[in-house]
Image (spheres, rainbow, N blue to C red):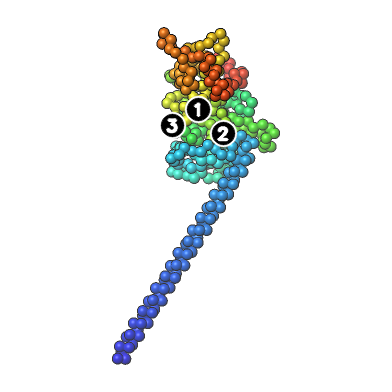
Amino acid sequence: QNQSQQNQGQQNQGQQSQSQQNQGQQNQDQQNQSQQNQDQQNQDQQNQDQQNQESRGERRSGRQGRGRSAPSRPTPPPKGVGSNVRHVVLGDLSFRTWYPSYYPEELVGREIEKLYVCQWCFKYCRDIVPFVAHRKLCHARNEPPAGQLIYSKDEYTIYEVDGEEDQLFSQNLSLFAKLFLDNKSVFYDVASFNYYLLVHNVPNDSISNAEQERRQIIGFFSKEKMSWDNNNLACILVFPPWQRRGLGKILMGISYELSRLEGRIGGPEKPLSELGRMGYLKFWQARVASAILAVKNKTALSVEEVAEACWMLAEDVVSAIEAMGVLGARRADGSFVVSKGRVREWVGLNKVDLTPPVDEEGFAEDYLVEEE
């Protein structure tokens, strides 16, 4: 009986010890889990604080950028489209990208949250420290943009860059542009293209920084040096912070003025993207209406006559006048007629500004001599 009581006592003591150990382990697990939850909450709060700080910084940058012709809200990206670079920092402006680009994976990585791009030479860095160091020493900081000045009007200038002579700049520009273009395919073989940079020159009284801070490349278009289809434009882009200002019309206008100087009727490379077609239709409509209403002593013109007056392809003229709803009857020879009266009515109804986006007198004289 005594042995039985001893055994029973040992069993009870063992159970109590095991119970205490289990309870202690449970308490320790709960403490560890509580600490992990607290650490996660602290990390989440730090991330949120950092995002809020970046957001405030971007809003301040947007407000500061207004003096540099940069709005606070860039054009939002298309829905359902992903990119290997989620945000890009161009100078001191940060905005979202739209499409993936072909930056070297060994330099940028497979996916990156932010890519830092120099606003003068478009060199790219994945980290902010080398980016800041580069900006201080960039060779293009104290110089005009690459290429030759060919056009200047008010606050905007156009520079022509030879892709063969400035290959690194042209490649970097093309890689940056791909972040906002779905169908651009030329990135490294740039020697057969010219690039036309749209540069905004901020007035002297709007900022107090040095001369180089006053110039900003805000868009461009590329053009094949030799196009068998007479394409006067390969791709076009106004950078998102400067979109919705009608600046694309300047680039389109320059492309057609170049066609006129070359003596070739041309148009953009096709097929156009949906956004590209919408932009070109508006441009074509205003250009066609202006050309038709400028003709004296005629009440109607054929499509071919309008095309010659605008230096546009006949198919693009037809697209414009069909969208305007002013295409008239077909002649006996098969050509179509456009009524000036209906065009004038369309202009008044839609309140279309027929002021040319490009002034012929804005072209540099030495460039005109070279073209001739």
Q: Residue at x 59, y 18 (%)?
A: 360
Amino acid type shown at disc 1:
Gly
Label 1 element class: helix
- Secondary structure beneath label 2: helix
Foreground label between 2 and 1 = 1
Q: Nearer the viewer, mark 3 or mark 2?
A: 2
Q: Amino acid at mark 2?
A: Trp
Q: Position of residue 24 (x, y in %)?
A: 43, 73
Mark 3, secondary structure of its residue: loop
For the point 58% across and 16% down, the residue is 369
Question: Is residue 269 placed above or below 82 in the rendered structure?
Answer: above
Q: Check disc 3 and report the residue beneath it.
A: 183
Q: Residue 10, how many percent across, how many down? A: 35, 84
At which x and y percent is residue 248? 54, 28
Residue at x-position 41% and y-position 8%? 332
Mark linked to residue 242: 2
Earlier-in-chain disc, 3 versus 2: 3
Q: Which mark is residue 279?
A: 1
Question: In the shown orientation, is residue 212 left or right of residue 302?
Answer: right
Q: What residue sits 56% from the left and 49% below the top? A: 52
Mark 2 vs mark 1, CA separation in Å: 15 Å
Crowding around mark 3 (Cα neighbors within 10 Å: few <14, some 14 to 19, many 20+) is few
Earlier sequence position, callout 2 versus callout 1: 2
Circles 3 and 1: CB distance less than 8 Å? no
Kind of residue sitting beneath label 3: Asn
Say left or right for 103 vs 3.
right
